[in-house]
Image (tube, rainbow, N blue to C red):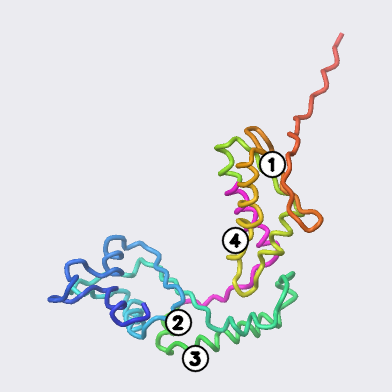
Amino acid sequence: YMEKHAVARLIGAPPGYVGYEEGGQLTEAVRRRPYAVILFDEIEKAHPDLFNLLLQILDDGRLTDGQGRTVDFRNTVIIMTSNLGTSSETKGRFGFVTSRAADDGQREQRQEQIEKAVREAFRPEFLNRIDEIIVFEPLTEKELAQIIELMLNEVRKRLVDRKVDFRVTDAAKAELVKEGFDRQYGARPLRRTVQRRIENPLAKEILAGRFAEGDIVEVDFAESEFRFGKAEAQSAPQREPAAATA
């Protein structure tokens, strides 16, 4: 909603204009589903007219659409995201965040920089109507490893149809996190890393007939490369026969 006419679509066209019967994109959605979560991503890029609409919603809890109907927003949750102040946060910082508590001084400085950027970008009357401003912390290595695990589980589910099991060693997971980590772009490069390092090579191996139904694929990282091999099935431990009683 960077342009004025795009913002107008939120409440709908007034009588006599094209699209009057359709209603507003925002007002019509909330009118039909009053209990909703509304997300505005990168709100700092929006046209100033959008903030005038938000002032009405945040202050009165209602908004009048192009057809003159009042829409109740009191049961909605409005979330706005922004990248303001993050360029100075990421500049000159490399590696993983190993401890949040050990970085209290930098955290406070980072918080002040972001809050200053927010105050410079938005009007006071708009900020005063926001209930809470939350600053997100950088992802830690442990959290990135959990994201990698979720992505690998998606690959594992897709292999179920072929009745192929799928395992990834800790060394391979650690390398995926190392290659996919980017402080500026967050966790998004992880998806491309998993596709490039795991999904694409594994698909080629399956198409080549190296792995068949019932096989267990094990992915390892050794000597600077990912290796795909067959793992042995883990047999269940056998119980010792019970001693005979007299």
Q: Secondary structure at mark 3?
A: helix
- Left or right position of 198 against 67: right
Q: Vertically, is 2 above or below 245?
A: below
How many residues crowd mark 3 within 10 Å: few (<14), some (14–19), many (20+)? few
Residue at the image point whose x is 36% and y is 83% from the top: 47
Q: Which residue is mark 3?
A: 120
- Left or right position of 27 against 140: left
Q: CA distance from mark 2 to mark 4?
A: 28 Å
Q: Secondary structure at mark 4?
A: helix
Q: Is residue 62 magenta?
A: no
Three-letter amino acid code of the residue under disc 1: Val
Where does residue 22 sit, x and y in percent of width and height? 21, 66
Q: CA distance from mark 2 to mark 3?
A: 11 Å
Upstream in the sequence, badge 2 or badge 1? 2
Q: CA distance from mark 1 to mark 4?
A: 21 Å
**Residue most extreme to the top:** 246
| Region in magenta | 131-155
Where does residue 242 sit, x and y in percent of width and height? 82, 18
Q: Vertically, is 87 above or below 98?
A: below
Residue at the image point whose x is 79% and y is 24% from the top: 239
Q: Which residue is mark 2?
A: 44
- Magenta stretch, main secondary structure, is helix
Q: Which residue is mark 1?
A: 217
- Left or right position of 21 against 156: left
Q: Is label 3 or label 1 in front?
A: 1
